[in-house]
Amino acid sequence: MGTSDLENRWTHTRWSCNVVGFKSKNRSPSSKPWRHMLNHTHSSAPQLASNVALNAHLNRLWSAVVSKGTQTAYSTGMTCYIKFLLTFGLFQTMFYHRLPPVNEVYLQYFIAHCYGVLQLKHVTVKTYLAGVRFFYLQRGIITIFDHRGSGALNRLQSIMRGYKKLQAPTSRKGLPITYTVLARIVCTLHAGVLGPLNDLVMECMCLTAFFRFLRCGEITCTARFDPSANICLSDIKFDFAKRKCTILLKASKTDPFQVGVPIILFSNSSLCPFSSLRKLFHTRTLQRLRRLESSGDQKYKHLFKSTHPYLCKLGEFGVTFFERKLSLISNEFWKSCFQSFIVLDKKIKPESFSSFLTEPIFYNPNIKINRKSFFLKYWFEKGVSQIIDLVKANKEFLSYEEFNDMYGICSYYLEFYGVVSSVKQYLGALNLVPTDSVEDQRCVVKTICSSKSGSKHIYFSLVSTEVKTKGQEKLELRFENLNWNNIYNKIFSTTQDVKLRWFQYKITHRILTTNTFLYLLTYPQNDLCSFCHNEKETITHLFWECDIIKQFWDEVSLWIDQCFHVYNMTFCAELILFGVQENIKTDKVMVIGYFNCATTTVLTRSYLIYQLQVNHLITFIFNTIS
């Protein structure tokens, strides 16, 4: 069949994005009645085809039939089909602006071309065929795809079934992201992968998707960012009092009318999406306050000063001032910015004497009189606002007479010494030594304005002063100098066994159930140790302090001393509970942590130590870790 026969047999339409305003011509009279009906339908409505407004509305409706990703896949499939026809001379280049011919024979060989030459997947070829059908459907041309009931597609369906059988199954099996996998992802991001801000965004995305069962397409964008469909920072609403946040999900498969679905995230103790989103919110909003302190953006400052004259300078007052003025801010954007500024101000403490001198005196929660932050208007009007205004050049505080003579203030004696004593008490709590260096910006303002773009310093300030959990505080009363990052990474770097990981996780977070806890629930008759029956059964006692357990570790220590590939291993509570100890050398990187998990798993079975002799137990542990 030549190209001229194709021109006489098939209807060509212009390859354009117009839906109604296209021209359709038959090269020769057709014997199919639907083709004359099609030509009559479009040729009898020139008034509609020339209406620009109706065409625009109709094109908008057609663009909403399928998603943008599906439209891209359909266009790729149609382009691939045209290239196939051009390669074998079945479609001339001069007719490239028109739709190509389509019949069952061409489609069969196109499928064979995709299988043998392009080596595409079965699902991809199905999408390409659907794309070819969609373009003809959009232009109102009836093709072989519209005659399913007459058996016109039986051969194509049979070929596609053979395509699917011949295609080798994918060796990679998709596994679900469990809580353990999620914890490992978060620990890896905390160690640093993509950069501070990108790691935080990735952490927020993973935690939000995990706890709210979101699809990947609901929290990501494949092409350009679209604020009408993708999640923006303004779509996140925080309720800090109830420790929860609400995210407006704009686009979802479960929301066909695109009205938006609100999802709520609550705070929890370990992997907390609320805390991660709060860090991201504060980090992004604090970048806006940088323009208030920059010297080059005077119009921006003047505009803000005209609406909020009492908030124009961030370094004059302490955080209590902004907390009181927060209710007066009507603009939600600026309100969120200063909420983030309050959080950052409370976290950042002066690290040097020069930064301490730039701290404000008034409305500072660390400088109080009668247990309250204060404001002295006549001091402020004379230019006294920072701690440096109370200090002489030799880094000593001004006396009462020197202060009154320098600023021309007739202040009360008790009032002056009340302020100075409170400042000295604040300095003593920080344990700072006077130096000769001088700074001109308050430490929180310096953190915000440390770079012209980006938010790395803000992010590190929000994360570095993170409050420790109660479990960490209680363990630090018993153990000193614990490296928590190393301890948490040990859980995932020592073994792939989920049970052992979960067991070590419970020990690290002090949530392993012992008789001390069960006794509160009236489950056992007492809270004594299951081995020695003399002391309370705590986690530390169960695995280290018990006399019977110590005998077990002594036997293990003798066996370890006979190994030539282990150097400087001394049994201690930190090694047994957390699997960490300094200066240990071994040729097996994971042996220490795995040894810890294996032995603690054996010890939890209370009667096993009585039923087996120590030598047999050591043999069992050796077989486990080797």
Image (tube, helix red, strand yellow):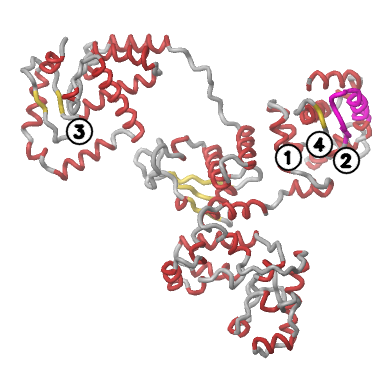
Inspect the image, locate mark 1, and give the three-letter code of the amino acid beneath it. Answer: Asn
Q: Position of residue 118 (x, y in %)?
A: 37, 17
Tell me the residue that label 1 is attached to: 486
Q: Nearer the viewer, mark 4 or mark 1?
A: 1
**Which quadrant of the rendered structure holds the C terminus?**
top right
* Lower position in the chain sequence, tag 4 or tag 2: 2
| In this rendering, position of residue 121 left or right of residue 592 | left
**Which quadrant of the rendered structure holds the N terminus?**
top left
The magenta segment is 551-571
Tell me the residue that label 4 is attached to: 577
Please check the rendered image and state whether residue 563 is part of the magenta-colored stretch, yes or no. yes
On residue 16, the disc is 3
Alpha carbon distance from label 4 to label 3: 70 Å
Q: Position of residue 415 (x, y in %)?
A: 71, 83
For the residues bearing labels 4 and 2, Cβ distance under 8 angstroms: no
- The answer to whether residue 609 shows anywhere in this view is yes
